Structure formats: C-alpha cells, structure tokens
Image (cartoon, grey):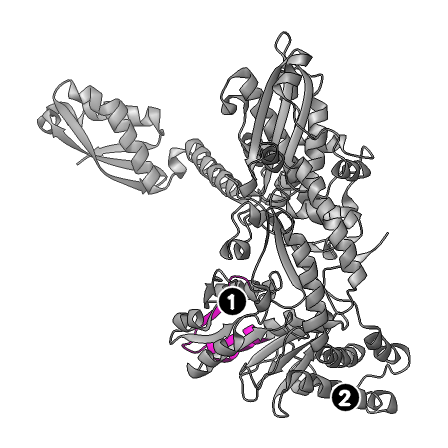
C-alpha cells in the first residue's frame, strides 16, 4: 500500500482531455452501408465483439480495398462505458489507411497511447484499461472475417493480461529467468496485472482463463522439480541416499548386466546395498542358469563388479549371496 | 451550468441547521468530554441532548443502548463480531443468515467470518427485490445465532418487511440486526414497533455529518465492544467521542423525523414526476414497485445505454447520480438485484440510480426531466444494437 492508494481518487479526473473529447463526441461512430462501401470501391466488413449481456460490446465497420487489402473507411457502434466509447473511436481512426495485416498489429496499448494528452501520462486510470481491450479484439474479428480464417489463427499467443498484452509464455519465462517469487515481481517485470488487475487472481472485474497467482504457483513447482532433478542427476553415487543408490544399481543391472547374462539363460537380482568403510557393498542373488554356474563366483562376478565400477563408482564391492 | 445532486443514497448535503449547531464544537467548545475541568464538562449537556434526540428518533427505551460511533460500517462490524465473540466462537451456534444484497459492510464482514468457521446463508431477493419473513424462517436452523437483513436497499430503495422478519427471529430465539442507513428519514423507524436487537445508522445519510453513526442495542442483547480502550460510551466503544459529530447527528435525526411527512409527500411527488417522465421513454424499466420503495429512489434501466456512460454524460450537463451497473463496480457480472427483479442480463448492465432528498427542488427535477431524454438519445446513437434495432423499426 502506498500513500496515493489510501485515498483512491476521482476516476474521471484521471481521464485525458482526448478521452473526454472522444467520449462526448465520438467522430467515428456510425455505420457504413453496402452502398457506401461499393461507392468507395471496397468490400464491407462488419464485425461484432462482446455482448451487451456481458456489459460491453462493439461493432466495427470496415471498407477494405480488395486490391491491396487497405482499409478505406472505418466506423463503430458500441455498448460500453465512456472508456470503451473513446477507445473504439480512436481504434476506428487508427485503422484507416492501414492494410488489414498492419491493422491486426494495433493493440489496446496503441489505442491508449493515441488517447494521451502527454506522451508520459496515461490516458485512462489503470482499472479502466480493460475497457480498451475490446477495440483490439474487434479488429482481430474483422480481419478474420475479411481473410476468411478462424479468429484463433490470428491469435499467436495465449494472452494472460489483456490490458498490457502479456502472453502466458512471457509470464512463464520471466518467472523462470529471473527466479520471481511474487505476483508483484511479475508486474514489475512485465506490467501484467498492473492495470485492471483481473488477471491477478479470481474475483476481479472479469473472469480470466489464467491467473498470475496460479501461473506463479505452477511455474515455481516446476522449477523446484527441475532443480531436484538436476541435483539428483549431478549427485555422485557415494553421496546418494539408499533409495537413490538402490535405483541406480537397479538401472545398471537392468541396462548393462542382465542383457549379458540372459544370453546364457541367466539372471540376477539386487539383494541389498550397504555402506562399509567408505565403500559400497552391493549384494546380488543369481537366478536362472547363473545360479548353478561355476564361474558365477569368479569371472562373472568380476565382470559385474567392473560394470558397477565403470557406471557408478570405483569404490563398489559386489558380493554374491 | 446547473449542478443538480441526485445521489443522496450515497451521501447527503449537511443541513445548514446541523452545520450551525456543530460549529461551536470545532473552535470554542473543544474540551475532551472525559476531562474533569470546565472545558470538558461544558460539552456534556450538548452530548446528553444529542443522545436524547437519537433515542427519540428511533423510539429507544432508557434501558437500551445507542452507541455513537464512526459510521454504519463500524456498527455493522461491531454487531457481527460481537455476536461472533459472545455466541459463536465457543458455542454451538455458528450460523448467520443475511442477504445477497446487503451493503458490503455486512456482506464482506460475513465473508470474513466464514474464514473463522462461521456458516453464512446469503438469501437471494425475490421478484419484488426483497426477502420475506418466510424466506428467513425457512433458513433458520438450530445453529442460527443471528439474522442480519437491511431495512431498505441502497440501490433499489425497496423496503424489506423487517417487522415480520424481526418477529420470526424473536419467536425462534435468534438475534436480529438491521442495517437501517437507508431507512432513517424515509420511513418510520421505531424499535418498539419492530423488535430488532441491533440497528445501525449513519448520520451522513440523513443530512448529518460524515464520520459519525450509531448502533442501537436492545437491553440484554449480547454486546462485545469492537474497540477496546477507555470507558467511553459506557465501555461499549472506546475512543474519544466525536462531540461535534454527535451533536450534529442528534439534530439531523430530529430534523429527519420532522421532515418525514415532507419526504413521503413532496419528495415522493418529485420522485414520481421524474419517474413518470423517464417511463415515457421507449425501452426503459424502473425497478421495484414505487409504493414499496423509499420515497426518494429510482433505479432505472435504459436498454442500449451502459450505466457508467450514462452517468458520465449526465455529469457533463451538471446532473449527479450513480450507477449500480457492473463496469464501475467490482465485477463485470450482471447486477444480481436487477436480474432478480426481472431485468434481463443486458438491462442489468444499464442501471442508473437517481436519489432525491428534501433539498431537491421542483426546478431541479424539471431540468433533469428535460435533459435526461437528450442523454439517452446521445448514447443510443452510439449504441450498436439499439441503433440497429431502431433502424429496422423493431422496437
């Protein structure tokens, strides 16, 4: 908590003049008819995003020149708060003159920046950033209609924080690379969760598929598993606990000893492992043809011990019981 | 530009008469009432008079207590935690009944008590926007310690049947609390007629100052202080008494009751005039029967117009009201009260609350009546579905 968060503040005092101007007079509001599109020499695209039953919705009209994919005209209608209206208005304006593939790159961050009075002062309060996201989404929808492709094919990444356009992969990577331990650290590194805060945990303005608290928990759990795996892989046989020693010995028997004995109808099983005077005693019990074989206490035993020494540790003694 | 305030369910203008009686306690009579010297003792008679005004205001008996505190939120917390510590923490009764439409001061406190092992039933409202005594009776179990149901809803203005609910609680041996912040000065609040055990109120909702409120506790009802320290308020609430606030609240309560008839006639007529004008618009819905509402409140949904956008547009033309629509609140979910009383999900995102007071004038209402349709038209011109529907003449 900081001083400026204790009082809260007037929401509207944090809007830029440009937002106020466009709320009061959204110059790009309206519709475009088929006749108007034809007169402009383009194809009419109408895209809806959101639903009034969800509290926010926007309809985008484009006239696109099929020769070069350029957007010749753009208008909108919306059902939403003042921020949604102003964002939709500037979004429609930013589309004009761009090719459809360029327009897809317009994000809600671009929209917010275009609404600023001063380059360094945000145009809307943080909790209203999510109201600008529809403007980005409806462009994608319009582009998918024009390109006749599925909307999902235009979405390259899974977005966790819609306000700051931060992907799931980015959040996961930044946690791993920087060993982040708190959501606040994720926000510091990525801006995810800095605006409307819906993506931090359930219970915010809107339901999200992914929440930062869950991603952090899961990535931290994976990191701990990875760390454990690495530490086990790097561990020498001598310093392993008994469980790990048993596992390692079983692996050597399975991968390197049994295949050799099996050629003559023999087999072997692990009977016990004991530490003794700085060495490790591995007790084995012969099975199959090896059980009655004369060399099982001499040459075969030396061969098995040699394999253990090579694969695990020089200080291993193999004892047949 | 006109500047018209129709957000009186949020807070009210301090009545100039109230401001006047408070003034001496800022700079001249500032003694601590617990001090033994003249500075302290000279304020006692004023505090005593204020307490008399509060007791008279809700018809409390001498043996009952009215603890002057900082606000209704403090009063609500005191009741809920007091019952928790006195009855629920160690005993077998670990159940509270409340409603889904309570003020967060009750609802969120109940949510916190759930983390301490308390079981809470949140009753939903019916199509009239209220819970009934039958709803409460059906929810009471042997483990129920407390029922907390508001007297009047802050968003819809709907007045709940607290007398019947209180009687059910009394018959079943369950304590009953009501948050009456929206009821004082808008309907008769009489704790002899309505057998509540606890009742909370806040001065700034009835033209008193902010930062002072009251908690009524019926004699012998369990009570554990929320604030411990000195022996202020008979040991029921530590902390030096806000003398100016208490004196102001006392007079504000008296004036609110003196003005009740005016509120029920003149303010209601102005409310009904505005409501009738709004209802002339196409595709609008006023929530709740006007006879069952507080006389100052209108909650209206306007199809195709998002609530916050409407607030913003009206504000540009000097009209202050508020929205219960989701965008400005904690969640984007549709307003459950509005859904319960029959608004579809789209309408439930369009709520505008207009709340009048005894200081609202006829000229002001006339101005709002003239400006309101213009704001609706401006926003419907932007609205995607409404403009499209209008164009196809399907409305």
Q: Chain of mark 1?
A: B
Query: Where in the figure is residue B165, as x and y percent of width and height?
Result: 48, 76
Whether residue B375 is situated above or below residue A279 in the rendered picture: below
Q: Chain of mark 2?
A: B
> In screen coordinates, is A213 left or right of A60?
left
Residue at image point 70% right, 34% down = A87
Residue interval drawn in magenta: B79-101
Along the line of sight, the residue nearer the viewer: A247 or A172: A172
> In screen coordinates, is A26 left or right of A100?
right
- Would you say residue B23 is visible in this rendering? yes
- Residue B94 lies within the magenta run: yes
Query: Where in the figure is residue B335, as x and y percent of width and height?
Result: 56, 53
Along the line of sight, the residue nearer the viewer: B212 or A166: B212
Residue at image point 68% right, 67% down = B268
Q: Residues within 10 Å of mark 1 (few under 14, many from 20)?
A: some
Circle nearer the viewer, 1 or 2: 2
Query: Where in the figure is residue B110, as x and y percent of width and height?
Result: 52, 66
Whether residue A48 is situated above or below residue B17 in the rendered picture: above
Q: Which residue is mark 1?
A: B113
């Amino acid at each position: 908590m900081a001083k400026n968060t204790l009082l809260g503040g007037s929401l509207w005092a944090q809007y830029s003049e440009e937002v106020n101007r466009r709320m009061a007079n959204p110059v790009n509001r309206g519709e475009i008819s088929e006749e108007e599109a034809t007169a402009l020499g383009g194809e009419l695209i109408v895209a809806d995003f959101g639903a009034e039953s969800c509290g926010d919705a926007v309809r985008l009209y484009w006239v696109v020149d099929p020769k070069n994919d350029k957007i010749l005209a753009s208008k909108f209608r919306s059902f939403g708060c003042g921020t949604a209206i102003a964002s939709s208005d500037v979004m429609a304006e930013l589309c004009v003159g761009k090719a459809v593939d360029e327009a897809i790159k317009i994000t809600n961050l671009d929209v917010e920046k275009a609404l600023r009075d001063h380059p360094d002062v945000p145009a809307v309060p943080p909790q209203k950033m999510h109201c600008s996201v529809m403007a980005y989404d409806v462009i994608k929808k319009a582009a998918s209609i024009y390109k006749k492709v599925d909307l999902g094919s235009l979405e390259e990444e899974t977005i966790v924080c819609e306000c700051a356009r931060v992907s799931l992969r980015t959040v996961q990577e930044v946690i791993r690379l920087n060993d982040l331990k708190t959501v606040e650290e994720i926000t510091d590194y990525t801006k995810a969760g800095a605006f409307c805060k819906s993506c931090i945990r359930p219970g915010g303005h809107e339901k999200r598929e992914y929440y930062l608290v869950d991603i952090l928990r899961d990535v931290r759990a994976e990191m701990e598993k990875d760390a454990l795996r690495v530490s086990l892989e790097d561990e020498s046989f001598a310093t392993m606990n008994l469980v790990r020693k048993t596992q390692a010995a079983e692996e050597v028997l399975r991968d390197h000893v049994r295949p050799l004995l099996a050629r003559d109808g023999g087999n072997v099983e692990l009977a016990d492992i004991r530490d003794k005077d700085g060495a490790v005693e591995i007790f084995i019990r012969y099975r199959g043809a090896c059980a009655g074989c004369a060399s099982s206490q001499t040459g075969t035993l030396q061969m098995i011990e040699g394999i253990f020494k090579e694969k695990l540790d020089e200080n291993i003694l193999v004892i047949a019981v | 530009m006109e500047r018209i305030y129709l957000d009186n369910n949020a807070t009210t203008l301090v009545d100039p008469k109230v401001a006047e009686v408070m003034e001496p306690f800022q700079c001249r009579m500032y003694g601590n009432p617990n001090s033994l010297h003249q500075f302290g003792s000279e304020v006692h008679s004023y505090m005593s008079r204020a307490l008399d005004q509060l007791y008279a205001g809700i018809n409390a008996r001498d043996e009952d207590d009215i603890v002057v505190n900082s606000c209704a939120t403090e009063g609500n917390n005191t009741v809920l935690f007091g019952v928790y510590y006195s009855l629920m923490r160690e005993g077998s009764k670990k159940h509270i009944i409340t409603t889904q439409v309570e003020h967060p001061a009750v609802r969120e406190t109940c949510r916190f008590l759930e983390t301490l092992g308390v079981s809470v039933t949140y009753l939903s409202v019916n199509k009239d926007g209220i819970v009934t005594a039958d709803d409460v009776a059906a929810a009471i179990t042997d483990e129920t310690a407390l029922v907390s149901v508001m007297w009047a809803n802050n968003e819809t203005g709907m007045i709940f049947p607290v007398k019947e609910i209180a009687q059910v609680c009394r018959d079943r041996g369950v304590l009953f609390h009501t948050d009456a912040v929206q009821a004082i000065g808008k309907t008769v609040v009489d704790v002899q007629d309505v057998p509540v055990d606890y009742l909370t109120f806040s001065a700034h909702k009835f033209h008193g100052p902010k930062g002072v409120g009251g908690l009524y506790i019926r004699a012998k009802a369990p009570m554990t202080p929320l604030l411990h320290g000195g022996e202020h308020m008979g040991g029921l609430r530590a902390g030096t008494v806000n003398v100016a606030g208490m004196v102001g609240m006392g007079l504000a309560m008296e004036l609110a009751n003196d003005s009740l008839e005016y509120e029920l006639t003149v303010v209601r007529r102005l409310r009904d005039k505005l409501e009738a004008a709004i209802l002339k618009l196409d595709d609008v819905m006023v929530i709740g029967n006007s006879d069952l509402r507080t006389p100052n409140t209108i909650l209206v949904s306007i199809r195709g117009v998002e609530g916050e956008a409407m607030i913003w547009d009206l504000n540009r033309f000097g009209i202050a009201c508020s929205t219960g629509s989701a965008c400005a609140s904690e969640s984007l979910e549709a307003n459950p009260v509005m859904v319960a009383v029959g608004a579809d999900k789209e309408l439930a995102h369009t709520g505008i609350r207009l709340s009048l007071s005894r200081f609202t004038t006829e000229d002001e209402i006339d101005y709002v009546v003239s400006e309101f349709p213009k704001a609706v038209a401006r926003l419907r011109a932007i609205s995607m579905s409404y403009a499209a529907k209008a164009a196809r003449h399907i409305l």
